[in-house]
Amino acid sequence: MDHAYIATTRGIRVSVKTFFLPDQSKPAEAKFFWAYQVKIENQGGDTVQLMRRTWRITDGRGRTQEVRGDGVVGKQPVLGPGKAFEYTSGTPLDTPSGIMHGIYHMVVPDTGEAFDVGIPAFSLDSPHQEIRVH
């Protein structure tokens, strides 16, 4: 999918692309899996470090789970001005569609100032979802 979801907070640009993974999904067993590719770009003037993340994952039935943790993919990247960090992760759902959004909890190492960066809401779509016309 070539559509990117983008949000910028305090000069930190977060862009997300999603990919449905049919090889890892089992629709007959209500198991659907997506990968999402995230790029975090520091377009501001301060060096920042990503310390923690909070995700809200909502399935096609409206059930939401919150996932919190340190860093991303086992790292707490430090991004100087003009630098970027990219990673790929994934999420399973028991419905053929859903939505995710969240927050990266950042700190400015030089001053200790903490701030939150919004992760744009992005859609988890599969070819197995029911299409309804209202």
Image (tube, rainbow, N blue to C red):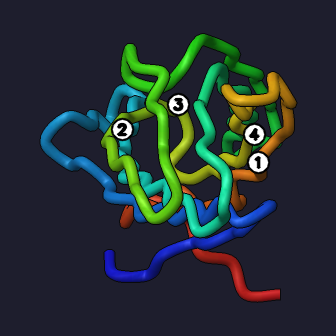
Residue type, numbered disc 3:
Asp
Real-space CA distance between mark 1 and mark 2, rounded to the nearest whole angstrom: 26 Å
Local crowd at mark 1 within 10 Å, few (<14), some, or many (≥20)? Answer: many
Real-space CA distance between mark 4 and mark 3, rounded to the nearest whole angstrom: 23 Å
Q: Which mark is residue 10?
A: none
Kindly identify the residue that appears in the image at 80 percent across and 28 percent down. Answer: 111
What percent of the width, then of the height, locates residue 26?
27, 34
Q: Secondary structure at mark 3?
A: loop
Q: Which residue is mark 4?
A: 103
User: Which residue ends up furthest to the front in the rendered image?
Assistant: 110
Real-space CA distance between mark 2 and mark 3, rounded to the nearest whole angstrom: 9 Å
Real-space CA distance between mark 1 and mark 3, rounded to the nearest whole angstrom: 28 Å
Q: Quadrant of residue 77?
A: top left
Mark 1 and mark 2 lie on one chain; the one further toward the N terminus is: 2
Q: Secondary structure at mark 4?
A: strand
Q: Quadrant of the C terminus?
A: bottom right
Q: Which residue is mark 3?
A: 94
Mark 2 and mark 3 lie on one chain; the one further toward the N terminus is: 2
Q: Which residue is mark 2?
A: 33
Q: Which residue is mark 1?
A: 117
